[in-house]
Structure formats: C-alpha cells, structure tokens
Image (spheres, helix red, strand yellow):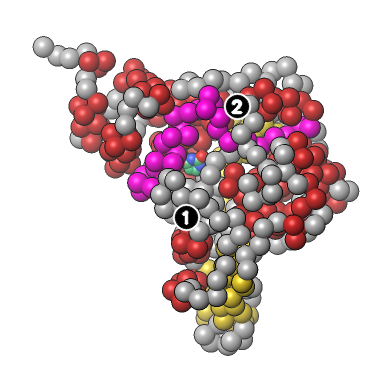
Amino acid sequence: MVKTPELRSVPELIAHKRDGGALSDAELRSLVNRYATGELPDYQMAALAMAIYFRGMTPAETTAYTLAMRDSGRVMDLSKIPGKKIDKHSTGGVGDKISLSLAPIVAACGVPVPMMAGRGLGHTGGTLDKLEAIPGFHVDLTPKQFAQQLATLGCAIIGQTADLAPADKRLYALRDVTATIESIPLITGSILSKKLAEGLDGLVMDVKVGRGAFMKNVDDARVLAKSLVRVGRQAGKDVRALLTRMDDPLGLMIGNALEVRESFLTLRGEGPADLLECTLALGSEMLQMGGVAKSRAEAHRRLLRAMRDGSAASLMERMIAAQGGDKRVVAEPDRLPAAKVRIPITAPKGGTVQQIDALELGLTGVALGAGRTQTDDVVDPRVGIELAAVVGDRVAAGAPLAYLHVNERRGHGRHVARVRDAFTLGARAVSLPPLVIERITR
Ligand code: URA
C-alpha cells in the first residue's frame, strides 16, 4: 500500500529530501509547524536542513515552505497605518550596518518602515545584536507595540517575537551553528517568512555577493534574488532586489557597538563613502516604492536632505527612546560600550591594498566574541575590528592596516595574524567598481 504523505514519518521525509525528492505543501507545513511548537527536535530539523542544503528545493517547494514559515505564527495587519509600509533586508554581510540608519532616514522622508530583523548569522553580523549594543535598547516589542510605534514614529526595528515567524526564529539559530546557511530556499524562507509576517507592502532586498557574502558569485546571487522576488510577489508584495558587492567589508567598523557608532555618521550623511552609496541606492528604491519620490534623483535629494537637516538623527533618537534605549548615544557615541584595548595591526610591507577578505574579518570578529558559534553564546558588544586602510589605499611598511578592539592585550596573536593576512598588498593601483551590480524587479 502506498502511504499518504501525511503518514510518512519524519525520518522518511528527511530521507526523501536527502535522496533528491520533493516534499509536498502538506509535508512542509507539517514539518514547519511541528518544529515551531517544539514537537520536532533540533536534531531532525538539522538533518532536514542539511538535506535541503545539498538537494535544494523546487520553486513550488520554496514557495510552500516560505508560506508555511510565515504562517507558523501570527501575520500582522498594518493596513490601518497610512502609507505604503516598505522594509529593507540584507542577505548578510560583514560590516553591513545599513539597516540601522536606513530605517530612520527613510521614515524621516515619509515612508513607514516596519523592520523585523535578525541576529548575527555565521560570519555576518545581525541588526538586532548591533542595536542591543545601545544601553537599554530592547528589540522584543509586542506586535501591538510595534504597530503603535510605527503609527506614531514611522519606524520600529524588532526581533521575531514568540508569535511572529517562530519557526524561523528557531531555525535561524539552528542553521547558524550547523553550517546550513548558504542555501537559496532556506534563505528565501527565512527572510520572507518574517518579512511577510510583519505586514509590509513592499520590500527591498540587498542581496550581497562576494567573499564576505553567503552567495559567492553573481550567478548564485541572481538566483537568490529572483527566488526572493518571485516568492514575495506570489505572496502579493512588491519585492525588488539589488545585488551589491561584498568582497571587502562595508565601511570601516566590524563589531556591534563599533558598527552602531559608524551608522550614526551615515545618519548625518557623513562617514565612509560605500555606506552612503549603499544607503542611497536602497533608500531610493524604498522612497519610490513608497510613492514619495518619482525618480532616483528626487529620492537621493530627499534622503540627503533628511540626513543633513538632522531629521533622520532626531528620528533615530526617538526610536531608541521608544524602545527603551539611551538616546544620548546618537549625539554622544562615547556612551556606547567600548573595548578596553585597541591593538594596531601593521602592514608587513609597503604597497596598495588590493583586496581585504571580508569573510576572514567576519570570522575573526566572531572569534573575538562579536558573533556566535553556539546558539546560546552571548555576544560581546564591545569587541571588533576597525579598518585603518581600505581597498585602493597606499600604505607604508609598518603603517596600521586595522585595529583589534578587545578587552585584554594578551592572547590575540592568531587574531592579529588573521586580520593582517586578510589584506593583500601589491604594486597595482586599484579602483573599486560601483557597489550595485544589478537590479532585479521581476
Ligand atoms: N538573513 C536572514 O534573515 N536569513 C537568512 O537565512 C540569511 C540572511
């Protein structure tokens, strides 16, 4: 007798996927729901995630899986809040602190930004870990508080609550420590489940490509971007994607409090040029999707105005205060937690910086304690890496390439070596191509 799909046991479903089979809507929904409630243990979900990692999913499976993840909890209705609610999400990079400043900048331009963000994943940092570096800031608003803050301020950044995409909350942490991150269907389901649950109208995806991203080449990144756009649109949302370069880190700071500090510069239109370029590219999509700018040029003007006239910084202060944090950090970033020691890492020879391996720096950041290697690790907001040179810079032998921000002077020999080796120095002059590689809207 042929068993009906519902009667297949979990080991049979894992084996079916392991052997290259496709799972049905009902099977995926049952697995996701049982995982969300704790009925399905981590070891079975880890095995399934690894099978999906190797075997992939069909487009139909990816859609069914994403919708099941979304429906594992409550789906918010923000339709009573006027305006199109537009969010942005990155697939993850090193030094990628764009969301922190982008949400208040875009909201200051009149587009409500409901943002449900994630924690660090693998070698990449997470918006929630960064925000929690702000003393008192909490990311666990209830859906009601989230909607109220969105209505009054125009932006809120929260983590997954117990009832919003709970399956992703658990699976995200599990994937982080089981080497099952770099999978197009799993990333699609993870990102879109929480985004669709937050009740947005539109989403701009920043799909990172390169050494420091989960997608190492443009072809894979394009497939991921198309998967996100396709599934998002099937769920009735305006989803667009930019493929952006992530070979070397974004900005100069890697590590939670360090990145918050740097994002406050971007908030005022200051700071590293690559952060500003990425912020303007993503923000201009959001303003056009939100209907407050008709062209990219108009959007850029509005975004720059909000940065320079202080309205974005003021909104950031109000958002921090509304979420329990010390808003004085925006004007006085020295109030942020800081490491005790700053260790310089110097150039072994003179030359031009040809490349900086973002993956190596991301992994070193995790090793310093800025990220996790086990689900229950507690991150240290103070530690990280500060770049003193970027690609294209000429450095003399013995000049600083970077600094480690740590809490004790001793015991960092291998971290210093790893950061130094992440820099390639050579004789060639280097100029970086634009950050945005491609725009995908369908
Ligand atoms: N960001 C997410 O939210 N999930 C992923 O799987 C990768 C990046």
Label 1: which secondary element: loop
Residue 238 position by quadrant: top right
Q: Name the disc covering residue 198, or none.
A: 2
Distance (Cα) linking label 1 and label 2: 26 Å
Residue 248, percent from left and from top: 55, 63
379 lies left or right of 130: left
On-image quarter of the N terminus:
top left
38 lies left or right of 271: left
- Look at mark 1 in the image and give the residue it sits on: 123
383 lies left or right of 421: right
Mark 1 beta carbon near ligand 1 (under 8 Å): no
Q: Residue furthest right?
A: 309
Residue 89, percent from left and from top: 59, 40
The image shows residue 387, relative to residue 381, as above or below, that is: below
The image shows residue 340, relative to residue 116, as above or below, that is: below
User: Which region is colored magenta?
Assistant: 153-182
Q: Nearer the viewer, residue 131 or 253?
A: 131
- Crowding at mark 2 (Cα within 10 Å: few <14, some 14-19, many 20+): many
Residue at the image point whose x is 48% and y is 34% from the top: 169
On whether residue 173 falls in the magenta region, the answer is yes
Could you tell me if residue 430 is visible in this image? no
On-image quarter of the C terminus:
top right
35 lies left or right of 83: left
On whether residue 136 falls in the magenta region, the answer is no
- The amino acid sitting under disc 2 is Glu
